[in-house]
Image (cartoon, rainbow, N blue to C red):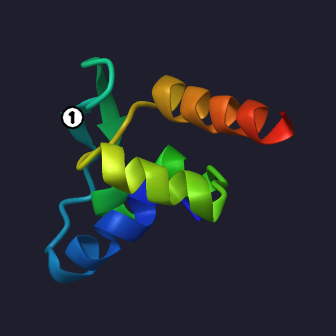
């Protein structure tokens, strides 16, 4: 399950959503991207992370990462695990 989905699900369930994606900035690279967590349709819901990767992300970041950065972290962690 996606890091961002878990982190934002409680907020999503408590908010009156407007059915519009939020424009936010990636905490890693600073790029602006669309986050659909507030409408229950974010691209990150489909990203599968190992529990160890999820724990590391929670330690390192407080907010969302863009798709490129999240996928890079996921690939980098997978490469480290292979060694």
Q: Classify residue 9 as left or right of residue 82.
A: left
Judging depth in this view, the residue of 76 and 35 nearest the camera is 76
Where's residue 14, x and y in %? 17, 82
Where's residue 48, x and y in %? 67, 54
Q: Residue at x 58, y 26 (%)?
A: 72
Q: Is residue 41 visible?
A: no
Where's residue 28, x and y in %? 32, 26
Number of numbered discs: 1
Residue identifier under label 1: 24
Please determine whether, in this image, residue 56 is positioned above or below residue 80: below
Q: Residue at x 41, y 69 (%)?
A: 6
Q: Is residue 82 visible?
A: yes
Q: Quadrant of residue 34?
A: top left
Q: Classify residue 65 as left or right of residue 78.
A: left
Q: Quadrant of residue 19?
A: bottom left
Judging depth in this view, the residue of 81 and 3 nearest the camera is 81
Q: Residue at x 41, y 31 (%)?
A: 66
Q: Residue at x 37, y 36 (%)?
A: 65
How would you rate the neighbour count of disc 1 (Cα within 10 Å): few for under 14, some for 14-19, many for 20 or more? some
Where's residue 16, x and y in %? 14, 74
Please determine whether, in this image, residue 41 is positioned above or below residue 21: below
């Amino acid at each position: 399950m996606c890091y961002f989905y878990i982190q934002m699900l409680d907020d999503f369930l408590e908010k009156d959503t407007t059915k519009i994606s939020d424009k936010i900035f990636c905490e890693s690279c600073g790029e602006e991207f669309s986050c659909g967590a507030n409408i229950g349709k974010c691209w990150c819901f489909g990203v599968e992370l190992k529990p160890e990767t999820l724990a590391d992300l929670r330690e390192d970041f407080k907010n969302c990462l863009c798709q490129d950065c999240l996928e890079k972290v996921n690939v980098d962690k997978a490469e480290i695990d292979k060694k």
